[in-house]
Amino acid sequence: MHIDILTLFPQMFDSPFSASILKRAIDRKLVSVSLHNIRDHTHDKHHTVDDYAYGGGTGMILKPEPIFETVESIKSGYANQESSQSPVILLTPQGRCFSQEIAYELSQCGHLILICGRYEGVDERVREHLVTDEISIGDYVLSGGEIAAMVVVDAVVRLLPGVLGSEASAIDDSHATGLLEYPQYTRPAVYRGWSVPQVLLSGDHAQIAKWRREQAIQRTLERRPELLDKANLRLEKRQLVNRLKKS
Ligand code: ADE
């Protein structure tokens, strides 16, 4: 996968991309990331990227020309057919709410173009004529789309084949199953008098799987009950949910 990121602050991406899983994925060439400074695509002496809003208002609006030109210069490096199918995603609090499902959807694309908005907004013509998707990482306002882009890149890249040590690690993740993840323990078996649940020490794989399933459902019911309505639960899980709801 290749990811192009348009931003006014490329340096913000230095540390998240130089540590942990993202760095390993980049080093192993499972993903490549190019940062593009929108300011490099301005033509005036002051490298102006924003301007006052027509109709008045306090905030500055990102101008359309440098954003269009940056995306067009990225696309010109790809074969026509290839680049016409690449999603061009604007990170904005007005977008559809990011989820594990969207992360899976994006992980199937060979190429993503992410545009980090800034200031009070982006000229609407960018939305109407350039962008193919808008994503928000939650109902709060960040100073810009950079941190949101990092969140999206992290969630997508860890789903690419070969990025995680074991493919199973992503399968059991919270949200991957539509449920929150079950509790996890490691050694020691007893810490400050707090014991690891006996079933996990039993070596009985069927019982362990059953316990984990039940714990995941119970935890989801307690913390995020609305997820259970969306999760595609098999009959056995539905029965357990009903039992837990009644108790
Ligand atoms: N830019 C500012 N706030 C944002 C949010 N919540 N999600 C995505 N991009 C943003």
Image (cartoon, grey):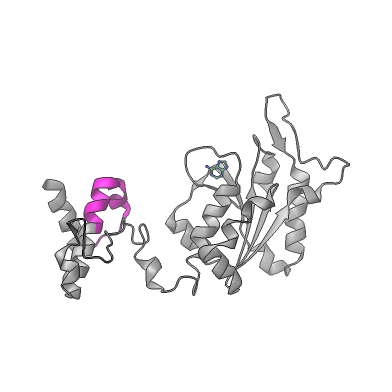
Q: Name the spot of residue 64 as percent of width and height, x first.
A: 74, 43
Q: Examine the residues drawn in magenta and state their main secondary structure.
A: helix
- The quarter of the rendered structure image containing the N terminus is bottom right
Q: Is residue 106 above or below residue 135?
A: below
Q: In which quarter of the view is residue 30 placed?
A: bottom right
Q: How many marks?
A: 0
Q: Nearer the viewer, residue 58 or 185?
A: 185
Residue 221: in magenta span:
yes
Is residue 131 visible in the rendered structure shown here?
no
**Which residue occupies 80% across, 40% down?**
48
**Which residue occupies 50% across, 71% down?**
163
Q: Is 133 positioned to the left or the right of 62 in the image?
A: left
> Furthest residue to the front?
192
Q: Is residue 143 above or below residue 170?
A: above
Q: Name the spot of residue 112 as percent of width and height, x first.
A: 61, 61
> Furthest residue to the left?
247
**Which residue occupies 12% across, 47% down?**
246
Residue 123: in magenta span:
no
Q: Is 102 positioned to the left or the right of 201 in the image?
A: right
Q: Nearer the viewer, residue 71 or 7?
A: 7
Q: Is 1 positioned to the left or the right of 226 in the image?
A: right
Q: Nearer the viewer, residue 20 or 139?
A: 20
Please give the range of residues in magenta. Answer: 216-234
**Which residue occupies 46% across, 70% down?**
164
Q: Name the spot of residue 92 as percent of width and height, x first.
A: 57, 43
Quarter of the image where ligand 1 sits: top right
